[in-house]
Image (spheres, helix red, strand yellow):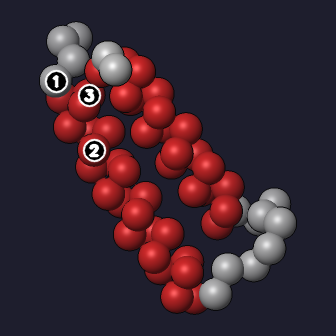
């Protein structure tokens, strides 16, 4: 997969995770699950930054 494709996939996953935390979520997450999701989103954000750092401007 190209770097742009990887970046798009990461952004889609981050957006889905944020939707689970947002005010329009379908179900409420437990504190434990919310903390796990935040850690997962931080990891995805770090991967996205690494991908974007490799893309020439």
Q: Position of residue 35 (x, y in %)?
A: 47, 79
> Which residue is at a point 55% across and 38% down the rendered structure image?
12
Give left or right: position of 57 versus 27: left
Helix, strand, or loop for circle 1? loop
The reply to whether discs 1 and 3 touch (Cβ–Cβ < 8 Å) is yes
In which quarter of the view is residue 31 placed?
A: bottom right
Q: Position of residue 30 (x, y in %)?
A: 64, 87
Residue ID for mark 2: 47
Crowd around label 3: few <14 · some 14–19 · many ≥20 (10 Å): some
Q: Which mark is residue 10?
A: none
Q: Which mark is residue 52?
A: 3
Residue ID for mark 1: 54
Of 2 and 49, the residue lying toward us: 2
The reply to whether discs 2 and 1 touch (Cβ–Cβ < 8 Å) is no
Task: Identify whether 15 is placed above or below 18.
Answer: above
Sequence-wise, the earlier of marks 2 and 1 is 2
Sequence-wise, the earlier of marks 2 and 3 is 2
> Which residue is at a point 67% across and 80% down the rendered structure image?
29
Give the distance between the C-alpha atoms of the residues marked 2 and 3, in whole angstroms: 9 Å
Task: Identify whether 3 is placed above or below 40.
Answer: above
| Residue at the farthest bottom position | 31
Indicate the quadrant containing the N terminus: top left, top right, bottom left or bottom right: top left
Q: Position of residue 50 (x, y in %)?
A: 20, 37
């Amino acid at each position: 997969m190209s770097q742009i494709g990887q970046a798009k996939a990461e952004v889609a996953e981050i957006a889905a995770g944020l939707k689970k935390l947002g005010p329009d979520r379908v179900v409420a997450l437990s504190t434990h699950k919310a903390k796990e999701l935040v850690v997962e989103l931080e990891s995805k954000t770090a991967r996205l930054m690494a991908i974007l750092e490799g893309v020439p401007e």
